[in-house]
Amino acid sequence: MQKAIKNSSQNRYINKQARDQLGGLTIMFLLGMGVNLIGLPSEVTGAAKTATSILLGLHILIGLSLVAGSITAVLRARRSIFQKFARTGLIAVAATFFSGVMTFATKSNWWSYAMSIGFIANFWIYGLLFFKTRDA
């Protein structure tokens, strides 16, 4: 069984990555809620269409950065006791990103619901990873 080395540089890197993921998830939530409040670009006109298009574009870009960040977390957690958390985070981010793509492609509220479940799962996973690496 592997043991965490207290205050190791690897733990600090994992902790930083988890913190960054939490920040990205928070921004994703706010952008997504903005799009929900204003409406999708296909549902509105004028300045509202411009605003929601920008919010949706940023939502997609941050989503891509969360995928990249989860891959980075897995790489930083190699051969550590936190590897399972990081892998679980990668799977959850990938599933949530897929749900977002399907929401956009099908306009189905069920995929949007799946995306919200994924958000909660991701926030929980990276929150645990953040706190566990902080204390390790």
Image (spheres, rainbow, N blue to C red):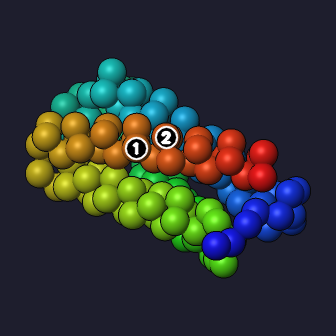
Q: Which kind of residue does numbered mark 1 sit on?
A: Ala
Q: Residues within 10 Å of mark 2 (few under 14, many from 20)?
A: some
Q: Is residue 36 visible?
A: yes
Image quarter of the N terminus:
bottom right
Task: Pinpoint residue 74: horizontal percent, then vertical percent.
Answer: 58, 70
Q: Total marks drawn?
A: 2
Q: Residue at x 33, y 21 (%)?
A: 37
Whether residue 24 is visible here, answered yes or no, is: no
Give the percent coordinates (x, y) of residue 39. 27, 28
Q: Which of the numbered marks, if any, corresponds to residue 121?
A: 1
Q: Is residue 19 above or below residue 89?
A: above
Task: State left or right for residue 81 relative to residue 86.
Answer: right
**Residue 6's spot in the image, x, y percent?**
86, 57
Instruction: Return the residue nearer the eye: 52 or 2.
Output: 2
Q: Judging from the image, what secondary structure is the residue with disc 2 in? A: helix
Callout 1: SS: helix
Query: Which image quadrant for residue 98?
Result: bottom left
Residue nearest the observer in this picture, 24 or 82: 82
| Horizontal arrangement in the rendering, residue 42 relative to residue 50 (left or right) | left
Q: Which residue is pictured at 76% across the width and 63% down the height?
A: 4
Residue at left 68%, top 57%?
17
Q: Amino acid at mark 2?
A: Trp
**Residue denoted by label 2:** 124
Q: Is residue 13 depicted above or below 38 in this figure?
A: below
Are discs 1 and 2 less than 8 Å apart at CB? yes
In the picture as drawn, the residue positioned furthest to the front comes out as: 1
- Mark 1 crowdedness (10 Å alpha carbons): few <14, some 14-19, many ≥20: some
User: Which residue is painted at 58% across and 44% down in the image?
Assistant: 128
Where does residue 130 sit, x and y in percent of width and height? 67, 46
Q: CA distance from mark 1 to mark 2?
A: 5 Å
* Residue 91 vertical position relative to residue 120 in the rendered view, above or below: below
